[in-house]
Amino acid sequence: MISYSIDWVINKRVLYSRVWGVQTQEHIEQSDEDMKQFLEEGTPLIHLIMDARELESMPKSLGNIQSTISAITDPAYGWVVAIETKNPVTKFMGLMVAKLFRLRFRRVATIEDAIQFLSEMDNTLNWQEADMSILSKQPE
């Protein structure tokens, strides 16, 4: 069962990814393939709002994660803005992944904080074109 979603908030510029439940190695592999496709379609720099508030757990092997994820090293990537889970282990793993891949990374408390941060970091983003309904979709 898929436990993530990825979609454009601002077409070809800002992605919103929601992860929930238990992430397996297979989920990470599939989401990496999906992300590669979005990056190919997008216009750099492409920013990602990662909503992990409903994430319960993820693989704990940084080596496995590092060998699985390749999209995140694409030069088209801009900022990764994480709306973090309260789970301390998952929060720590997210920070370690960000450090491991040397991401432009910011952790925030809310979606509104993520939008504010990206607005400050990239004045080429047109939030008037944003599909804000993406941000309120519930997991299927």
Image (cartoon, grey):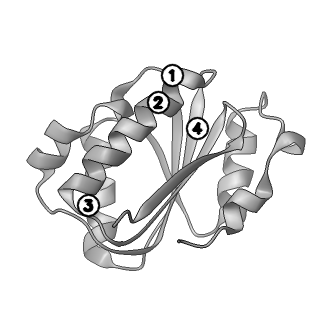
Secondary structure beneath dot 3 equals helix
Identify the residue position indicated by label 2 in the image. Answer: 37
Splitting the image into 4 quarters, where does residue 35 fall?
top left
| Residue lying at 71% horizontally and 53% vertically, measured from the top left | 115
**Which is more toward the observer, 51 or 113?**
51
Identify the residue position indicated by label 3 in the image. Answer: 93
- Which is in the foreground here, disc 4 or disc 2? 2
Identify the residue position indicated by label 1 in the image. Answer: 40
CB-based contact (under 8 Å), mark 2 and mark 1? yes
- Which is in the foreground here, disc 1 or disc 4? 1
Mark 4 burial class by Cα count in 10 Å: few <14, some 14-19, many 20+: many
Instruction: Look at label 2 and name its amino acid.
Output: Gln
Earlier residue among tags 4 and 2:
2
**Which is more toward the observer, 42 or 106?**
42
Identify the residue position indicated by label 4 in the image. Answer: 47
Q: CA distance from mark 4 to mark 2?
A: 14 Å
Is residue 58 positioned above or below 29 on the image? below
- Which is in the foreground here, disc 3 or disc 1? 1
Mark 2 burial class by Cα count in 10 Å: few <14, some 14-19, many 20+: few
Q: CA distance from mark 1 to mark 4?
A: 13 Å
- Which is in the foreground here, disc 3 or disc 2? 2
Specify whether 120 is left or right of 126: left
